[in-house]
Amino acid sequence: MPSATQSGAERTPGKLFVVSAPSGTGKTTVVEALLPLVSGLAMSCSYTSRPPRPGEQDGVDYHFVSRERFEQMRDGTEFLEWATVFGQLYGTGATETRRRLDEGLDLVLVIDVQGAGQVRRLDGTAVGIFVLPPSPAVLEERLRRRSATHLTEAQLRQRLSVARREVEQMPDYDYAIINETLEDCVEELRCIVVAERASRRTRAGAGEAVARAFREWEG
């Protein structure tokens, strides 16, 4: 069931979970594995100016748009957040995000540290989760496996350099988990979502309604 607590017609807005990690850590794979395990949770589909990779589908993996169209959307303040990542533009649609949250759906944004900072400034209730690789060597190994398909050696070295800087942003997040094995990482992420849904600040409205009922109870 959705995390939204309903009392009559009342609906509690959903929560934003922001997941960031260095390129190659496996953050998207982790979130995709989480979704079937947690009801009422969805992953936001970002916009990007880069072309689709083999197997990627428009509207499923990303909304693929031209750089010109992306810049028009950016200048029209149509993004909740946006960032330039390795020369390509990425952004989260503001209208769609707000609509889904208003429907009571919890939403995961898989975005880089630049976008995560923008979201924190806009929404102080967003839950930040930083996913780490077990070590720099493991990250390099994972990137080298990926490089066989679409990364050059220069691009791989650039990603490792950027990863070093991104890891320094970890203290800005509420949680940090290590993606050593997919199963363990997904379980930790699931526990975070469940705990945040049950937190006092999340259930403040519903909790106060129950407390008020007890104060008024004459049984």
Image (tube, rainbow, N blue to C red):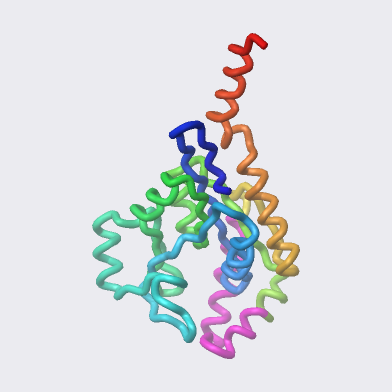
Name, please, the residue furthest toward the bottom. Answer: 148
Residue 135: percent from left, percent from top? 73, 69
Residue 46: percent from left, percent from top? 42, 65
Q: Answer with left or right where residue 187 lies relative to residue 55.
A: right
Front residue of this view, candidates 215 and 51: 215
Residue 191: percent from left, percent from top? 70, 51
The stretch of residues the image draws in magenta is 142-169
80 to 28, vertically: above or below:
above
Query: Can you tell which quarter of the image residue 74 is in?
Result: bottom left
Q: Answer with left or right where residue 158 lies relative to residue 190.
A: left
> Which residue: 64% across, 39% down?
198
Query: Does the stretch in magenta take in 146?
Result: yes
1 to 47, vertically: above or below:
above
Please name the predominant secondary structure of the magenta segment in the image.
helix
Front residue of this view, candidates 165 and 65: 65
Q: Total label count?
A: 0
> Which residue: 45% across, 57% down?
115
Q: Is residue 134 visible?
A: no
> Which residue: 39% across, 62% down?
91
203 to 32, vertically: above or below:
above
Q: Answer with left or right where residue 191 lies relative to residue 89.
A: right
Assign the C terminus to one quadrant of the image.
Answer: top right
Query: Does the stretch in magenta take in 192?
Result: no
Name, please, the residue furthest toward the top. Answer: 218
Residue 114: percent from left, percent from top? 47, 58
Q: Is residue 85 visible?
A: yes
